[in-house]
Structures are given as structure tokens and as C-alpha cells.
Image (cartoon, helix red, strand yellow):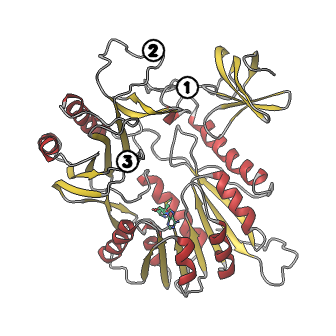
Amino acid sequence: MKQNEILEVEIAGAAYGGKGLVRVDGMAVFVRDAVPMDRVRIQISRRKKSFAEARVLERITPSPLRVSAPCPYSGVCGGCSWQCLAYSAQLEYKRQHVQESIAHIGLMPDVRVLPTIPSEQIFGYRNKVEFTCSPFKWQYPGEDRTRPMGEPAIGFHAPEVYFKVIDIEQCLLFPDAGNLIYRDIREYVQADSLPVYNQRTHEGFWRFIMLRHSLFRNQWMVNIVTSGPGRGHLQPLADLLHRRHESITCMVNNITAKKAGISFGESEHLLHGEPVIRDRIDDLEFDISANSFFQTNSRGAETLYGIVARYAALTGTETVLDLYSGTGTISLYLARTAAVVVGLELVEAAIRDAMKNAARNRITNCRFIAGDVRKTLSEIAIRPDVVIIDPPRNGMHPDVLKQVQDMAPERIVYVSCNPATLARDLLELKTAYHVVEVQPVDMFPHTFHIESVALLERFRDDECNRVAPSVFLP
Ligand SMILES: C[S@@+](CC[C@H](N)C(=O)[O-])C[C@H]1O[C@@H](n2cnc3c(N)ncnc32)[C@H](O)[C@@H]1O
């Protein structure tokens, strides 16, 4: 197989990352804009030692798994690479990714990976969306080129070009009301005299538009991220939105002078209403501020936490350690059936929210500690019966893995948004723990992303040959 070579193939699988996968002479070829069972003519665009990449020149026979994608940006915006794939197929390919990662990276081919639990909603399910502003519009095939080139682009990052943005008028993963609010902000920003932020020169004012929705209260948060103060430009926008959308109960301006394309502000200024919105999971209420983590699929979060609780199997006497606790949602969810829960989290604002959330829900057996898990874990003097782990995409640091094993909890419940780092960390833990089963939960329909919950049980001392203990799961 050579660079630029043209081949006719049938796509055999779906790769993690959203591309189609086919093996040619034993080598994996990742094909953009292709789904399993598509018969396509492809051209090799990149040839590496162990894999190749290709683009589709012609779709000869479309896959029977294809459905028509309702979003006009499907195939262009990298966000929903599987919108054209039947939802049932998406669920099965996600399960396979988890299974294969645990088999190949975690070296455990026999771990039980259950069928993926579907999302209740497959459109309009996101409670948070972040749009980026840029003077560089990404031109894509079929784009309306009659629009003035000078108009700033507002939307999502273009694939592989960090400073360009795909101009997006609405996102179907977001509720309709959110798209209406976004449209008003977009029009205002495009007409404003201050320029949008240029990621190459680091000049310009408007950086990000972030919207958040509370499903339970139907409250909206608008967070405008700018490179500096500009009340004279922001307050008229806040007033306009307040007049048009009565469900906006929080509008803030985060200011960041940092060059990195991250929407966290060094300072936050209230433009309208309260600085938080309030959402609910099960019978618990949570105040969420602009910079704190909260699961982006609210109904999916309830399902996810229900599985965490079932795997934790608490009886009311246990000490629980919740690592990477965010705004304390899992800690508080479990506190009702535990003796004590300790949450560790890096972001101080999230810890403050967690403490407020505990007080709001009259939960008194939770303690939250701010700091890097790697350092704070060695400083806390508890012996947990159950450890919950819900790390960011890059998983756990080896030091943290070691410290968790030294604490020797009976059970570990590992929640992961990245099958590869989950599998890598399970490989470390499997010397002392049996991986009982893994439950994938689909929180992100039409994307290749998948959340998984793994249940691990410690080998008993007499199980020196590390035979899996018999486990009963209801
Ligand atoms: C996937 S979120 C989990 C949040 C929470 N469990 C929930 O369900 O809402 C991961 C969290 O880990 C935190 N985090 C990232 N690196 C960390 C570190 N080194 N030490 C402690 N927390 C960290 C992030 O701030 C984020 O809140």
C-alpha cells in the first residue's frame, strides 16, 4: 500500500475517533466519512509504519447501517461523526470499543462488557455547549460562499486547524431554546464594533459563548468569555437577552488573558441574575457555576450515577472515597447510603460548589478536599471500603494508582470517559483486583464518545492464584 494509492474496499468496522476501519494486507486503514459496510473507493492520504489513513473518493454502495443525518453540518463538523449511522449500530460499536480496549490494552479478553445503555434523548440532550469566535472561517465543500468573508465565524473548531472555526448557526444536540438564545448572541457579536479574538495574534475581544441549561428548572446560563473587560458592550447584550428570553436566570462574563483556547476565566463578573443555575439529579439539587464540571447529559447522568450506586453496593456503614469529585455529585448521591464520603478535587470553585450542594441537600456526612489527587491522597488518614474514581480523559497518574492499591478498598468503581485510559489503568489494578464487569452508558449519541463504569473487587488474601471471586450482581 503506497501513499496516494487508490483502492476499492468495504469498511469493516468503526474506529474509536469516528472513522471507518478496514484492513488492507493486514494493516489498519482509517477512513474519514465512512461507516461499516460502506463499499467505497478510497485514496491513501497518509501512510505510517503501523497504520494508514484514507479519504473517500466515491461511495460505491452505501452501508445498510446508514441513516440520513438531519444536521446540515453532518460530515463537516467533527462533533457528530456518527449522525449518519443507525443509533442501534452506534451503541454496539461503542460497546465493542470498550471490550477491545480492555482486551488489547488491559490484556483482559474475557471481561464482561454489557450492552451499552442508550441515551433517553438522541438529539437535544446536551445541557452545555461552547461556541468559539474566530476571524478565520473554515471553508468546507458545499458551504455558502456568498456570505461576506469579513464576517467573523462563530461555532466549533475546524478539524486539524486550531485557529479556524466552522461557522454554525445551530447545534441539534442542544435544546431548541438554547439555539434561539445562541442565535441572538451570535447576531449581536457579529454586528458589534469590537473584533472577535484571533488565536494567532491573540488580539480581539469576543472569545467564547457558553450556554448551560438546567433541565429540572428550565433555567439558562449564558457565559460570555472575553479577553478583557468591556461592560459597555456586554451589558446591552445582557439586557437584550433578558428582554427576549425570560428563562435566562444567570448571565456572567468570564475574562481570560491566557493565550490557550480554554474558556475558563481568571475573573468572573455577573451581568444579570444569579451566578449559578440549579439542576437536579434524583432528589438532590445542585448549584452549578460557569466553570464547574457537571455531566453534559442530565438524564444520562442519573442513569450513570444509578449504576455507580449499584456497583458500590453500600449498606450505610461504609467509608467512601470519591476521587476527582467535581461538584460532588457522586459523593452526595452516595452519601445517603454511606457512613461517610470524602471527595477530592483539583478545582477550588468546584469544591466550593460541592460544599454548598451538601448544605443545600442537608447532607452532613460528606467532606471535600481541594487539591491534586496525587498529593492530597497521601495526606488524608482514612481507610476507605469503597473508592470511586472518575478521572479526566487522560486517566489516573501511576502514583495515584499505587496509592489506591495501598489503601486496599474492598471495591473500586471506576467511571471513565475514555476506554483506552480505563483499560490502561485496569491493567495496573488487575494484580490486586478482579474486574467483575463493565457497563457502557451512552451519554453522547452521534459521537464516538462513551462513558463506562467498571466494577472491581479486591482478591481475598487466600486467592493468591488470583482466581476471580464469585460475585452476585442483582
Ligand atoms: C470527569 S470529571 C468528574 C466529576 C464528577 N465525578 C462528576 O461526576 O460530576 C473529572 C474531574 O477531575 C478533576 N481533576 C482533574 N485532574 C485532577 C487532579 N489531578 N486532581 C484532582 N482532581 C482532578 C476535574 O477538575 C474534574 O472535576
Residue 413 image point, x, y percent: 61, 68
Examine the image and state in which quarter residue 284 appears.
bottom left
Residue ID for mark 3: 128
Indicate whether 95 appears above or below 345. above
Please identify the quarter of the rendering in which residue 59 is found: top right
Q: In this view, does 135 lie to the left or right of 70?
A: left
In the rendered view, would you say 299 is above or below 25? below
Give the alpha-carbon distance from disc 2 to disc 3, as whole Å: 28 Å
The quadrant of the image that shows the N terminus is top right
Badge 3 marks a residue whose secondary structure is strand
Mark nearer the viewer, 2 or 1: 2
User: Label 1 amino acid?
Assistant: Val
Q: Where is residue 394 in the image (x, y as percent from the top left)?
A: 59, 56
Whether tag 2 and tag 1 are in contact, CB under 8 A, the answer is no
Question: Looking at the image, which residue is at 33% across and 66% down?
Answer: 285
Q: Which structural element holds mark 1?
A: loop
What x and y, as percent, mark residue 70? 45, 26
* Residue at image point 72% right, 50% down: 101
Decide which of tag 2 and tag 1 comes sooner along the chain: 1
User: Of helix, strand and loop, which one carries label 2?
Assistant: loop
Residue type at the position of mark 2 = Gly
Q: Earlier in the sequence, mark 3 or mark 1?
A: 1
Q: Dot 1 corresponds to which residue?
A: 67
**Alpha carbon of mark 2 to alpha carbon of mark 1: how far?**
20 Å
> Where does residue 318 sit, x and y in percent of width and height?
55, 84
On residue 351, the disc is none
Q: Nearer the viewer, mark 3 or mark 1?
A: 3
In the image: residue 333, left or right of residue 64: left
